[in-house]
Amino acid sequence: MTGILLLGFLIGMQHAFEADHVAAVSSMVTSGTSVRRAVHHGLAWGLGHSLILGAVTGLMIGFGLSVDEKWSAIFEFGVGILLVVLGARVLLRLWREGGAWRVHRHSDGKAHIHFVTAESERTEHAHRHGLPLGTISIGMVHGLAGSGSILMMTAVGLDTPSDAMLYVLLFGIGSMIGMGILSAIIALPLHWTGKSLKAGNFAIQGVIGLIAIMIGITIAAENANALM
């Protein structure tokens, strides 16, 4: 049982690095340059993911319920739509900020070129406190889809309800740690380029938005039959 529980923790860490999770968290951390804030969002995503998995697993154990494959596909479709929205939001924000090369000339006559955006200091750099509820909600949506439902069925199949809930708890802790690490990895290049290479930062954010949209469309298309 100890080996099974440890496996749950490790699977939780690996679970955080699935493509749709990477795309979701990437699109959520693009607007800020703080690595600490990005990790905060990653942990919040993992918290929401863990809360819904624990709640549904508890209901499955307590009331003998099961997760139908059709519902899992419906939630997967929802995740796909959510990724499209997140990716589009990144691109829309970049479009609103704009970006252009500007010549900056010093008083001594020397000139150099800057890449500038119409970034709002109030919007992007305001200090935020408390839990990011939107990120927690996104994590909850992901928890109901795909491999989340497989985890719940695995947990229910363990010998005792306490073992099942402990398995889910360790899985959740693993996913939070994995998502925190992932968020830091994503935020570091954004942080570095945001200070010294604005054009590169702009490009990285645009690529993240496009990838999120493409992954979202793929997931939604693969699960569209569930809505028929």
Image (cartoon, helix red, strand yellow):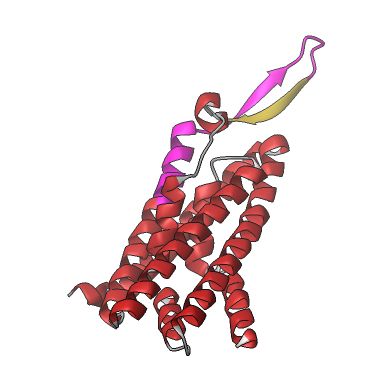
Front-most of 125 and 2? 2
Query: Does 31 sit left or right of 3 as displayed?
Result: left
- Depth check: 21 or 193 in front? 21
Question: Percent from the top left, x then y, of residue 204?
Answer: 59, 49
The N terminus sits in image quarter: bottom right
Quarter of the rendering containing residue 213: bottom left
The x and y percentages for residue 124 are 54, 32
Q: Residue furthest left?
A: 228
**Res 201 visible:** yes
Q: Which of the pair 112/9 is nearer the observer?
A: 9
Above or below residue 193? Residue 87 is below
Q: Residue at x 45, y 39 (%)?
A: 93
168 horizontally vs 62: left or right: right
| Residue beneath the point at 43% across and 74% down | 148
- Along the line of sight, the residue nearer the viewer: 125 or 164: 164
Q: Is residue 133 above or below residue 164?
A: above
Q: Is residue 49 above or below residue 37?
A: below
Q: Quadrant of the C terminus?
A: bottom left
Instruction: Determine the residue positioned at 29% across, 83% down.
Output: 64
- Residue 213 shows in the view: no
> In the orientation shown, which residue stands out farthest toward the top?
107
On screen, residue 103 versus residue 68, left or right, reads: right
In x, y percent, where is residue 132? 48, 44
Membership of 95 in magenta stretch: yes
* Residue 60, x across and y down, in percent: 33, 78
Residue range highlighted in magenta: 86-110
Find residue 186 and report its image quarter. bottom right
For this view, does 126 lie left or right of residue 71?
A: right
Q: Is residue 93 magenta?
A: yes
| Count of picture labels | 0
